[in-house]
Amino acid sequence: MKRIASSLLALISLAWIAAAGTRAHYGGTLRVSMQSAPDALVLPAATDPTAYWDMARLLSLVGDNLVRVDAEDRPHPALAVSWQHDSTARHWQFTLRRGAKFHDGSLASAPAIAQILGALHPNWKVQASQAFAAAPYSRDVSASGDSLSIDVDAPAPSLLAELALPRNLILTRNAAGTPIGTGPFRVTEFQPGKSLKLVSSDECWSGRPFIDAVEVEFGKSLREEALALELGRADVVEATPEAASVRSHASSSLPVELLALVFTTNSNAQEGPLREALALSIDRKPIQFALLKGAAEPTASVLPNWITGYGPAFPAEPDLARAKALLAGSRSQHSRAGAGAASSPAGTATRPLTLSYDPRDPQSQLIAERIALNAREVGITMQVSMSGADDIRLVRVAVVTPDPALALREMAREFAAVEPAVRSNAVDDLYQAERSLLEGNAIIPVFHLPVAAAVGPRLRDWSPGQLGLWNLADIWLATGRPEDSR
Amino acid sequence: MRRRLRLEFRTYFWLISFLLFLPSSLLASNLVETASQLADRIASATGPGSVVLEVTNRSSLDDKTVGEARSALQAGLRARGVHVVAADQAMGRVNVVLSESLREFVWCANIAIGTDPPRVVLASWPRSGNAALPATLPVRLRTTMLFSQELPILDVALIDSSTAAMESGVSSSSRLLVLDATRVAVYARQSGRWEPEASLPIAAPRAFPRDLRGRLLLRRDHLFDAYLPGTFCRSSASVPLAITCSASDDPWPLTFSPQPATPFAADENGPGAVRAFYAPSRNFFTGALSPGIGKISTVPSFYSAAALPRSSYTLWAVAAVDGSVHLIDGVTDQAIRAARWGSDLAAVRSSCGAGTQLFVSGDSASQAEAGRDSLRAFEIPDREPAAVSAALEFSGSITALWSDAALTSAIAIVKRADTGWYEANRVVVTCAN
């Protein structure tokens, strides 16, 4: 009996020993593959989401924002450790982190940061505290300013979220245009369109990263990326959300992209009833399950539900009867006006509408064809094309911030629509603002999609950012031998 | 005596009832208020009359709460002259969807009355924000949650010499010191809660590394010392309490107090005391010891070490950075390559088994993926580790594990997977029989 008990103890001990893990190790080079092939280390527009996410991820390794925000839109200190604003939210005061340095050794002082932010936002009045205003980029710690103010013309309750955007990273540039920041990694080599090498910064205010370096290969297709991961030639690659939903080492963000139909300026489909009929014809569920493997959220709103919570107030279910009724009403109105068939709503008779899509997006064509099929079911003739003059575009746009008011304004800007007036982040105000943006159906939201990544087996403590960015400073490599730092 | 017992029972009963029902009563109050708000807005849109009410749940609210929401909404509508009826008697339809964002619960009501264009009204409210062990193994691990906060806790120290504290960990005269990257906070126990008493900011002379670790040790001639990478902080000896920090590469004491002079203050200068140098820009000890373990003054770089007293010597277990575990007796250094324990070890005295148990953190890959971690007690008879307790499960990962100065308990800091908050847990050993 005693023997059985001790065998059991030994067995428990072995099982325990075999399963245990360790704290983070230092060392090793992380290999990353990306689809985009940037010519410069500059953030592109959010309407090219793949390139946008890739560059935002890389630049956020090099630089820091004044503040950062989490998925719940709560601000957290970064280069600024505290902040306050006046009752109108026009005047903001920031206390900066002492001792933070750019990778070239210069201090991230208030004058230096004021100069960078001032150049990014000429309409803001950005000022360092007066005593130190004359000494930007000083290497002398004692000359470091510790306070910064920002004055804006209109109340800016979303200023912190604005400052947390990747486009507001505090970066300087050397003569070659290479970004120099205060972040965990510094750029050592950049071959436009081909590769980027980063090494960890020992002086980083948030601590040296665990890995020694990051090597990025650009211009890889998703298939090439998957193969590189499979063969152990890459540690982190991008993946499609639908692939992430079935792969064990893949993970997705919150839905941070919007797939939408957007009517072009010269579109033949200018009539409201036609646009509404098209919006009501789209059956999103089959696309969601058959093409996107459930990895997308059907939507009829611009902002995702995880930001607003009022998604159900914009029904995304098809209503074919109403769509047909709208078109019939529109046709009879035209007939009564005596305009004849020649001027009947575009797409409903002789003139087919053209729907274009992004050929770089592997699912885009299939989704566009499915939407065209839905449209035909209610009597709208639509052809799918990847080039030429188009009436409607199927576009993907990044949702760049979790702040609802700012996100709505950013989306309106990306769609070249009139920016809605958003009074506050209260659901009622947001709902009204979003309704006004969607009025006239110039934009027809279809899906919200996450962005996904897959990682290799030697990566530890990988936690994909909920907002689409990657935190590579906190990951470590299981095979990287720890160095003895004595 | 009986009267006192009855009073205590009554107090406990009310306390437990309060704690159990507090969250649900808060939820209920929010729910009724939001239902009333939505009912008001629906009634403004419909006017008095009869409607069909449909409630769909697309949020994380459970079925019971959804039922309560529906009832509250129906009551709210009725109070405003809007009656919920069957479809054939209704003048319109109200579809309510219970939805949510990361920040709040949002209820959307879609109102269709006759041929009027449908209207949407909204209401919202903000979201608010250990395992028992089987008795088949010789010892049990018992845990008491001492404190929690959003900022990473590096170490805590409980000051209490009362006998009540020995049993439960905390008494009414307790003080708690909490070390994080920015300060040492002092809390006093008042009415069953930790109330802040003092906050001593740490002026760090250099940037701290990631996976920051720190050690808080109580002292006899002053209150405490705090060890952080490349930084040493010392408290004043008298009130008002103050702290002085300076750059320092001095070795950290590896707590070992065979015969502590006081119940809670360390004696790392006594016989058998060992100190280890901590790498100032990393998350591990370099391996250099001063004084060493017997004749051994250098061991591989390690994350943690724990002393297991024997009759004629002390056996040290060291969790090396390369994943191996070293058993060092002062003469020999035996590596157990196969033993891939967690990174954190701590020794705790008890009246069970061999008298001192080794706590080992888990953090296996599968546990980490599930957002869990565990702690298990081992003994090492004949240099072969044997588990002597079941695993004590935590709902998050163990980020620090230190023995207290008297080795009567260990402090396990756990980062909760659900909230991201840090909890300081006091873990003690109790005998299974």
Image: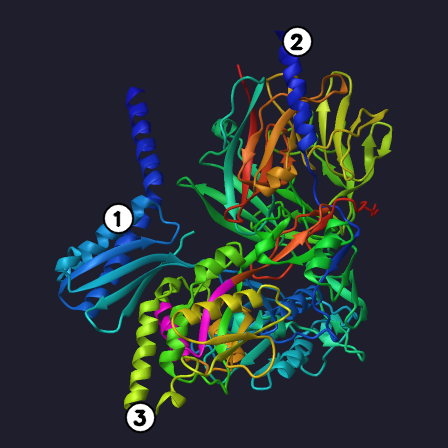
Residue at point 35%, 65% (across, down): A313
For mark 2, what is the residue? A3
Helix, strand or loop at mark 1:
helix
Residue A429 in magenta? yes
Q: Mark 3 or 2 closer to N-term?
A: 2
Closer to the camera in the image, B263 or A453: A453
Looking at the rendered image, the disc whose residue lies closer to the viewer, 1 or 3, is 3
Looking at the rendered image, the disc whose residue lies closer to the viewer, 3 or 2, is 3
Helix, strand or loop at mark 3:
loop
Mark 2–mark 1 distance (CA, rounded to whole Å): 58 Å
Amino acid type, callout 2: Arg
Q: Report the magenta residues as a range.
A: A427-448
Closer to the camera in the image, A401 or B258: A401
For mark 3, what is the residue? A338
Mark 3–mark 2 distance (CA, rounded to whole Å): 100 Å
Amino acid type, callout 1: Glu
Note whether residue A425 is visible: no
- Picture coordinates of residue B3, whole percent (x, y): 28, 23
Amino acid type, callout 3: Gly
Quadrant of residue A277 in the image?
bottom left
Note whether residue B288 is visible: yes
Query: Do labels 3 and 2 touch, CB within 8 Å?
Result: no
Q: Chain of mark 3?
A: A
Helix, strand or loop at mark 2:
helix
Q: Left or right: where does residue B346 sit relative to residue A376? A: right
